[in-house]
Amino acid sequence: MATGGNAIRGTRVGAGPMGEQDHGFHAERISISYWDALGNETVRYFAAGIAEEEIPDTIDSPHSGLPAGRDKENPPALAKAEPYKTHLAYVKERRTEEEAVTLLDDALQQLRDRRGQA
């Protein structure tokens, strides 16, 4: 059995002619550089026709996780990390002390009514 010239061996279906240089249309784009506080540069690409206000001023740097801005000399500072808040802390922000007492009294009364201890 002779080894024939199997032309499609090792290629993907629909790959086109071997050696094809143009695999589609490449839209025009612009590159924007961002720098974090450690001096790391990150480049992001955007469509050339995008409005300036749609390009973000800051991103999260993939190198350090710090915020990165477009001004190399003045990168954004790390935002102050807020301490972890419990569920109770969030509730206390939304309710006054008087509202809390009223809600607790109502809940206790409903519980007593269900148990028949009113």
Image (cartoon, rainbow, N blue to C red):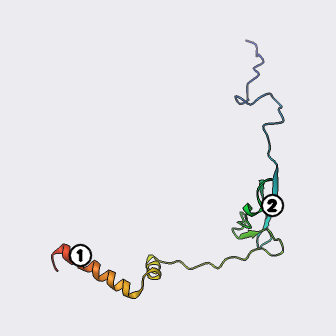
In space, the residues marked 2 and 1 are separated at their CA atoms by: 61 Å
Q: Position of residue 11 (x, y in %)?
A: 73, 29
Determine which residue is flagged by label 1: 111
Q: Position of residue 103 (x, y in %)?
A: 33, 80
Secondary structure, mark 2, is strand
Determine which residue is flagged by label 2: 32
29 to the left or right of 67: right
Q: Residue at x 15, y 75 (%)?
A: 116
Lower position in the chain sequence, tag 2 or tag 1: 2
Furthest-top residue in view?
Answer: 1
Q: Position of residue 32 (x, y in %)?
A: 80, 61
Above or below, 2 against 12 in this view is above
Using the rendered view, name the quadrant where residue 107 is placed.
Answer: bottom left
Residue type, label 1:
Leu
- Quadrant of the rendering where the C terminus is positioned: bottom left
Q: Residue at x 73, y 77 (%)?
A: 77
Q: Position of residue 83 (x, y in %)?
A: 56, 80
